């Protein structure tokens, strides 16, 4: 009988250790607190979404995660794009194109508008999230 009790006790200790390891691992990957990881946390898919038209005077671009939606935009010359930032911080950079509107610095929980005074095709990107890009064609 003592051998059976010892085996049951070891089995219970092993189960507790396994549960503790799972809880510890889950706590380490929970996203709360600080992180020392320098790699990307999310790999976005690059599915194009389209918005606007050659005559559109206003288009809204949202950022529900690490993509601009829509990320392919047509707009009339003089039209405005409203970049709607959620809780996750992003920026909008036009790559130093002198004909493009000014860049938008890293921000969150706000809406920032940019008016496109010049015709052409302008690419934009988020410097915080790889592959987060878009294109505006101004007619």
Image: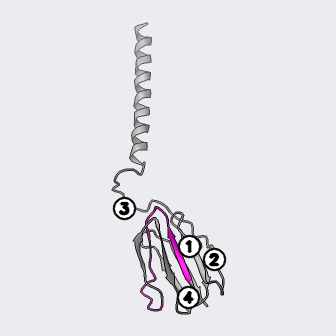
Residue name at image x 42 percent, y 86 percent: 96
CB under 8 Å between discs 2 and 1: yes
N-term mark: 4 or 1: 1
**Residue named by callout 2:** 51
In front: mark 2 or mark 4? 2
**Residue named by callout 3:** 38
Q: Which mark is residue 14?
A: none
- The N terminus - image quarter: top left
The relative height of residue 6 versus residue 14 in the rendered view (above or below) is above
The answer to whether residue 3 of the structure is visible from this angle is: yes
- The C terminus - image quarter: bottom right
N-term mark: 2 or 3: 3
**Residue named by callout 1:** 61
Residue 111 percent location from the top left of the image: 49, 71
Q: CA distance from mark 1 to mark 3?
A: 28 Å
Could you tell me which secondary element the residue under label 2 belongs to? strand
**Residue named by callout 4:** 121
N-term mark: 2 or 4: 2
* Mark 4 neighbour density, 10 Å: few (under 14) some (14–19) many (20 or more): some
* Of 137 and 130, the residue lying toward us: 137
N-term mark: 1 or 3: 3
Could you tell me which secondary element the residue under label 1 belongs to? strand
* Mark 1 neighbour density, 10 Å: few (under 14) some (14–19) many (20 or more): many
Q: CA distance from mark 4 to mark 1?
A: 17 Å
Q: Give the total of numbered labels.
A: 4
Q: Which residues are magenta?
A: 80-99
């Amino acid at each position: 009988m003592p051998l059976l009790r010892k085996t049951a006790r070891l089995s219970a200790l092993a189960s507790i250790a396994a549960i503790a390891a799972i809880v510890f691992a889950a706590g380490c990957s929970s996203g709360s607190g600080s992180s020392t990881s320098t790699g990307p946390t999310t790999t976005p898919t690059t599915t194009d979404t389209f918005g606007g038209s050659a005559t559109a005077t206003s288009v809204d671009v949202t950022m529900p995660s690490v993509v601009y939606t829509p990320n392919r935009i047509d707009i009339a010359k003089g039209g405005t794009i409203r970049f709607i930032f959620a809780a996750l911080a992003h920026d909008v950079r036009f790559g130093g194109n002198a004909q493009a509107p000014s860049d938008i610095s890293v921000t969150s929980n706000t809406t920032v508008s940019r008016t496109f005074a010049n015709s052409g095709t302008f690419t934009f990107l988020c410097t915080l999230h790889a592959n987060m890009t878009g294109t505006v064609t101004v007619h």
